Amino acid sequence: MQQDKIVLAIVDDHPMVIEGLKTLLKPEAAFYTAVSFIKGREFISFLSQNEAHLVLLDISLPDANGIELCKEIKKISPKTIVLGLSNQVERSIMLQMLQNGASGYLLKNVSPDELLTCIHEALDGRVTFSKEAKEIMARPSKAELGEVASITKREKQILQLLAQGKTTAAIAAELFLSPLTVDTHRKNLLQKFDVKNTAELLMAAVQQKLLSNM
Amino acid sequence: MQQDKIVLAIVDDHPMVIEGLKTLLKPEAAFYTAVSFIKGREFISFLSQNEAHLVLLDISLPDANGIELCKEIKKISPKTIVLGLSNQVERSIMLQMLQNGASGYLLKNVSPDELLTCIHEALDGRVTFSKEAKEIMARPSKAELGEVASITKREKQILQLLAQGKTTAAIAAELFLSPLTVDTHRKNLLQKFDVKNTAELLMAAVQQKLLSNM
DNA sequence: TTAAAAATACCTAACTATAGGTATAAAAAA
DNA sequence: TTTTTTATACCTATAGTTAGGTATTTTTAA
């Protein structure tokens, strides 16, 4: 009773990672057909004509934002299971991935066993994380799954000015606002990013590339 | 005329990268014996008892600083050729690696062909870079062209902790220093970078790529 | 082996950010 | 059109940073 193989896509700009994943998947090669893509957009093209059951999606691709890509994938093919794959250990990125429909998140130091376990779990419809990713997710945090940092225009603007070392008062003067208003925005940013001061806020913003592209 | 195989070591905490590299090396398996290590220290132990002709050394290992590790390797076994391997595109890291005796640097998006070419070149005694790494080496950074604040080890350490949102008191506790000392270091940093607060300091540090590696 | 640089530690006072609220009007979404 | 989100503004306290220093010891480089 031979059923069709599961189509497993790998999207990663590093050939060695692709090869590594393929090798780690070999023990179960009987069940999977692996296809791989260096570019995020290539996979989107593929997906519009073909089917993929599960995709291991690198978050930091040169030609696309992994988080946006995940959203796009789920829009084109809602049944495709997405597992985020990255070196990035930011909890907020993981949360954003889940919000955009991902079924889990693996850090690139995943062990061979974990990799296969996570793929099984994801194919069974469960949400899954690699060991280290799980630890990060377990970390206590105010930000719940529903309220992930999506910042408003005004907040982005204030973030930018904070990054220039400006004080609340200076920002207020520049934007013709009350310093108290600026303070409120800053406090909201701290809450959204789940950080406790401006320094940490800016580093989080840098990591999420919120400061470079405006 | 069968000569002994070249011992090629891979030091990387990601099993998938190790597998990927091994797969990419397969075409020339006749010439190489590949050994791999998840931990930097494991390789150091190995090296004290065995020989390795070339090592592909991941720069960002959890248990060791790649740059320091490179220095250590060259001390134990000066003949071992070290090729840095990383996702990190910081020119300063590459330069530090070379200073510590590395024969080149590969970014993890290296293509299969490049990988083999670079290994050949390194074994021939030449200094070698992957395509993208070469590009980065070719353009001197802003940092090197101009006004770079030269900061001390201690200052770098404190900068890193400030980037984690830690307060003077917290940093002092972590480093077993007086808060007043930490404060002095922070003040010196502000002066060196010619900025007026921690937020601006961190952004300047990010721009000069002083925070990504330690 | 000196001189310079780095790391250490202290002081006072002023300034700024952070925590934990509340509240209202104007835009956007549902 | 109602509901939700965004942007606005305020309050009280406390915690933490910044601006001016000075000064000793320990390392590193010349």
Image: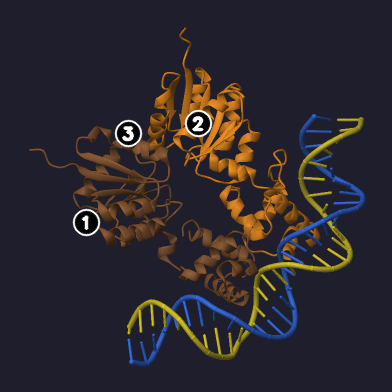
Chain colours: A orange, B brown, C blue, D yellow
Q: Residues within 10 Å of mark 2 (few under 14, many from 20)?
A: many
Using the numbered discs, state the Cα–Cα distance from disc 3 to disc 2 in whole angstroms.
19 Å
- Do tag 1 and tag 3 residues touch (Cβ < 8 Å)? no
Q: Nearer the viewer, residue A203 or B203?
A: A203
Which residue is depicted at the point 23% across and 35% down? Answer: B29
Instruction: From this view, report whether residue A70 is shown above or below residue B176.
Output: above
Task: Give the chain letter at badge 3.
Answer: B
Task: Give the chain letter at badge 1.
Answer: B
Residue A74 marker: none
Q: Amino acid at mark 2?
A: Leu
Task: Give the chain letter at badge 2.
Answer: A
User: Is residue B87 among the parts visible in the rendering?
Assistant: yes
Residue B79 marker: 1
Q: Amino acid at mark 1?
A: Lys
Q: Is residue A54 left or right of residue D17?
A: left
Q: Position of residue B130 (x, y in %)?
A: 32, 46
Instruction: From this view, report whether residue A12 is shown above or below residue A209.
Output: above
Q: Is residue B63 left or right of residue A72?
A: left
Using the numbered discs, state the Cα–Cα distance from disc 1 to disc 3 in whole angstroms.
26 Å
Q: Nearer the viewer, residue B38 or A202?
A: B38
The single residue placed furthest to the top in the displayed view is: A1
- Do tag 3 and tag 2 residues touch (Cβ < 8 Å)? no
Quadrant of residue A28 in the image?
Answer: top left
The kind of secondary structure element at disc 3 is helix
